[in-house]
Amino acid sequence: MCLDALMRCTYPNLEVVVVDNDSTDDSVSQIRAAYPDITILRSEENLGFAGGNNIGIRYAMAHGAKYLWLLNNDTEPAPDALSALVSKSTGNPKIGAVASICYHFDKPQTVQVWAGARTNLWLGYVRNTTTPQKDEWFHSLYGASLFLSRAALEDAGLLDEGFFLYWEETELCLRLRKKNWQLAAAPNSHVLHKVNASTSGNSTIRDRYFTASGLRILRLHSPVFFLAMPLFIILRFIRRLLHFEFGRCKSIWAGIQDYYHASPVVQQIHNGRNEGGYKRGAS
């Protein structure tokens, strides 16, 4: 689906790189058979959204790319989607990231996310918009189709690999804004996107990852993390209990444990000793 759409891309200077994030099926052999000229990078373990994308980012930057397009494999970009992203980004050298307008795959006329969101760092809440907004409105951009400047990545760092799933692009966008890079939407870049393909619609898995990642982003970016983190947890438990979703409460608890038993880099950040862990891989 995604690769077929990229073969119809009208932008002339595109090199497609596929990152296989430790898949367990025969997708790599199928891609090689259908697209023998496409570069495939394989990871020996599932590194999550951030780690998997960083493999591709590092490869592209090592090969001289000035811009990078992160595109989920459950998307179908319009033929001119990339051209619209390039046009928006190159029109202003202070733009560090540009997002497409994503539409529901099964309802192509209905906007799923209009480029990005506002972020509440008191509650760990992100509100994606489905209506047009000025570029200044965005706190973060949607990662399903995200166009990044090499210069911005070299300044702010790559995706934070302390996140496994959810909040990664939000965290990167918050970092870019702190470095005075601008975020933008490309209204003419249209992409169809399936929903929750990474978790197959499993709400308990989503709760676990969202909780762990939500705690991490609050610790990294909330000015009142010591209040925001417990409030975030309490509100998540209350919502599940009010709907008698006790199994999902267990998933939230598992996410809390995931956060507090994370890698040494996470613990350094949690203890106030950020030693540049979320800038790993930046050149």
Image (cartoon, grey):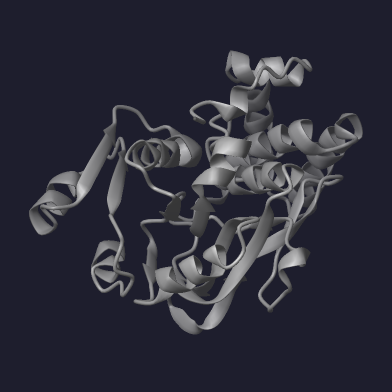
> Where does the image place residue 39, in percent across and percent down from the top left?
21, 46
Residue at (64, 64) in percent of width and height: 184
Observer-nearest residue: 95 or 111? 95
Picture quadrant where residue 122 is located: top right
Task: Left or right? Give the position of 173 relative to 7.
Answer: right
Name above or below for residue 280 compared with residue 81. Answer: above
Task: Left or right? Give the position of 84 relative to 64.
Answer: right
Residue at (55, 69) in percent of width and height: 88
> Where does the image place residue 9, in percent across and percent down from the top left?
30, 72
Name above or below for residue 115 compared with residue 175. Answer: below
Residue at (64, 22) in percent of width and height: 276
Residue at (57, 68) in percent of width and height: 91
Observer-nearest residue: 135 or 1? 135
Is residue 148 in view from this perspective? Answer: yes
Observer-nearest residue: 234 or 168? 168
Picture quadrant where residue 208 is located: top right
> Where does the image place residue 126, in percent across and percent down from the top left?
73, 55
> Where does the image place residue 162, in percent across and percent down from the top left?
58, 29
Is residue 205 in view from this perspective? Answer: no
Picture quadrant where residue 19 is located: top left
Name above or below for residue 242 compared with residue 231. Answer: below
For the N terminus, the quadrant is: bottom left
Name above or below for residue 206 compared with residue 254. Answer: below
